[in-house]
Image: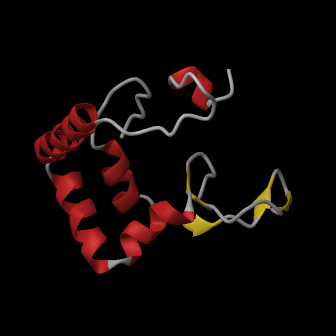
Amino acid sequence: HLLVRTTFSNDYFVRLLEEKWTLKTTHKGKPWTGPDQFETPDGALMMLPSDIALLWDKDFRKVVEEYAANEDLFFADFAAAFGKLLELGCKFETAKAGGGFLSFFGF
């Protein structure tokens, strides 16, 4: 698969299944001392443990397999979930008197 960074697709799920992911142990010839992450044999791609956990859990793996096999299903499910997020929004507790989005972040 050609990696196209600006295209919305199911490629994440396809790569999660098709690539061989191993725990990173070295970086540029030296021992890896950073947080756990998994990479492809050539080190070109990485996944976090939370990504790989989707493969280890039998219920989540089914979803990964469905989305990898059916991009239209992934698009439909994403659209429904994102639509809910936009419709329902999220509540912010105001950090300062006066409220508003910027005051939440201290501005």
Q: Residue at x 40, y 39 (%)?
A: 91
- In the image, what residue occupies the spot 78% across and 59% down? 34
Protein image colouring: secondary structure
Total number of numbered labels?
0
Q: Position of residue 107 (x, y in %)?
A: 68, 20
Give the left or right position of residue 107, taking residue 46 as reference. Answer: right
Of 74 and 103, the residue lying toward us:
103
* Horizontal arrangement in the rendering, residue 66 relative to residue 41 (left or right): left
Name the image quarter holding the N terminus: top left
Q: Where on the picture, by quarter, is residue 36?
A: bottom right
Above or below 12: residue 17: below
User: Is residue 20 visible from the viewing direction of this image?
Assistant: no
Q: Residue at image x 51%, y 40%? A: 93
Q: Residue 69 location in percent, x, y?
A: 17, 54
Describe residue 43's horizontal placement relative to residue 85 as left or right.
right
**Residue that sits furthest to the front in the current view:** 97
Residue in the picture at 35% in, 77% down = 57
Residue 89 in the image, given as x and y percentages of width and height = 31, 35
Residue 97 visible from this viewpoint: yes
Q: Quadrant of residue 32?
A: bottom right
Q: Which of 87/45 is in front? A: 87
